[in-house]
Image (cartoon, helix red, strand yellow):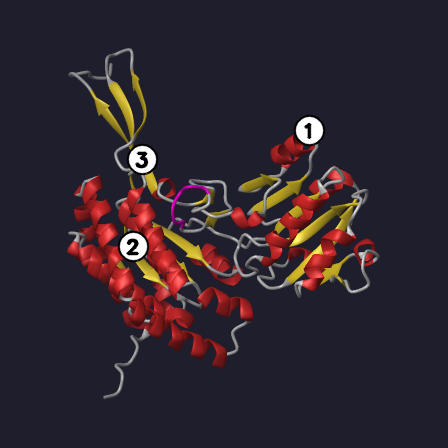
Amino acid sequence: MSAAPAPQPESVTDLVEGLAHSARKAQRVLARMDSPAKEQALKLAATALRAAEADILAANARDMANGETNGLTGAMLDRLKLTPERLAGMADAVEQVASLADPVGEVISEAARPNGMVLQRLRIPVGVIGIIYESRPNVTADAAALCVRSGNATILRGGSEAVHSNRAIHKALVAGLVEGGVPAEAVQLMPTQDRAAVGAMLAAAGLIDMIVPRGGKSLVARVQADARVPVLAHLDGINHTFVHAAADPAMAKAIVLNAKMRRTGICGAMETLLIDATYPDPHGLVEPLLEAGCELRGDARARAIDPRIALAAANDWDTEYLDAILSVAVVDGLDAALAHIAAHASGHTDAIVTDDQAVADRFLAEVDSAIVMHNASSQFADGGEFGLGAEIGIATGRLHARGPVALEGLTTYKWLVRGAGQVRP
């Protein structure tokens, strides 16, 4: 039997509207569930993920084979790949979200007015959240868990490279959630890979309350340009590590190597290394990277450290490689490092390595990024590492949420006013 034809563009709008209406109804049910019920449903979803390991890994193997055939880069394949260990981590992350404090119903502030009225700001779910993402199938589980825990319904639209993995993960998750009393329509996966569906989601103002894009720069740029729905943006991670003259060499060597090479394909990976011109052992920083197979591209002073460093092009300083490639520049102290970061950073994560506390304090205060670190690897830029459980992305904007977006970032608030018959004069 031949596969059913994909929906035509003119019918995709109806498809998205139908999903959104179903999500809205499910969200009203979800909003009435108490915290223990949501927690139990997520634990059942985690159990279902573990039970479906064979099916999920088989689906992922299909995606990996297709990805290799289609010429995906090594970094993209690493993002796509699932192993028993990664799948176990995915299920663990769902359980961790289940155990987090429920933000819904939190009283953010309370005040009594002179006329006797009592005002409260109460944290509530956003409503229906559309999540558009690429490559990483773990986003399917992370996003579903975060949305359910925060009382939101979600419509997931994953990339075509992970379509089989996403479907298998979604099937298992929903089975567990339904067992726990959550409507199946609270977590829906877009049933088509037709690109017109993305446009329909972006145009669904009044039906979808917020869009969260998670993927490459081109995806995020398209979402920001075309959306008629509020967007919680996750831009590229052009992350810097500045090794100051007063850095401990052993610490600097360990942090730099880890920040780049632990996993090169994640958004928290370092993409530019800045070395203070008076740092005593610059070769001790670049040699381990070269030995680990990292391609280095640098300015003239960086190339003087090691002849294996290639000449950087102008656009290297503004590139998120997501691969074993690193830009290296030698800078004249803190002011030059701050200027370079201000000119080229994407506002994601930037770090300094130094034992000079005054220098560190100034760096932390003046770098305008969502995450700013002192004496730590940028690979810690992760909601789980921040104690937030799974994350839906690292928001690099300035409104609503910034940094790792977890439960609180998926809520808004409303005002409650309690009176005793007051009328306004």
**Residue nearest the viewer, comparing 43 with 233:** 43
The local crowd at label 2, few if under 14, some if 14 to 19, many if 20 or more residues have their Cα within 10 Å, is: many
The nearer-to-camera label among 3 and 1 is 1
Instruction: Return the residue at label 1.
Output: 358
What residue is shown at x 50% (from left), y 44% (from top)? 397
Q: Which of marks 3 and 2 is nearer the N terminus?
A: 2
Instruction: Residue 387: say if magenta.
Output: yes
Percent x, y for residue 360?
A: 66, 34
Left or right side of 377 for 120: left
The local crowd at label 1, few if under 14, some if 14 to 19, many if 20 or more residues have their Cα within 10 Å, is: few
Q: Give, as a three-letter code, the residue at label 2.
A: Thr
Percent x, y for residue 124?
A: 28, 38
Instruction: Residue 11: say if magenta.
Output: no
Which of the 4 quarters of the picture holds residue 286?
Answer: bottom right
What residue is shown at x 55% (from left), y 70% (from top)? 74
What residue is shown at x 43% (from left), y 79% (from top)? 66
Above-or-below relation of 418 to 71:
above
Mark 3 → mark 1, Cα distance in angstroms: 38 Å
Instruction: Name the element at disc 2.
Output: strand
Q: Give, as a three-letter code, the residue at label 1.
A: Ala
Give the residues in magenta.
386-391
Instruction: Return the residue at label 2.
Output: 154
Quarter of the N terminus within the rendering: bottom left
Residue 60, can we see it?
yes
**Residue nearest the viewer, comparing 357 with 348:** 357
- Looking at the image, which residue sits at the far bottom? 1
Numbered label attached to residue 413: 3
Q: Is the magenta stretch mostly helix, strand or loop?
A: loop
Mark 2 → mark 1, Cα distance in angstroms: 45 Å
Which of the 4 quarters of the picture holds residue 121?
Answer: top left
Q: Give, as a three-letter code, the residue at label 3.
A: Tyr
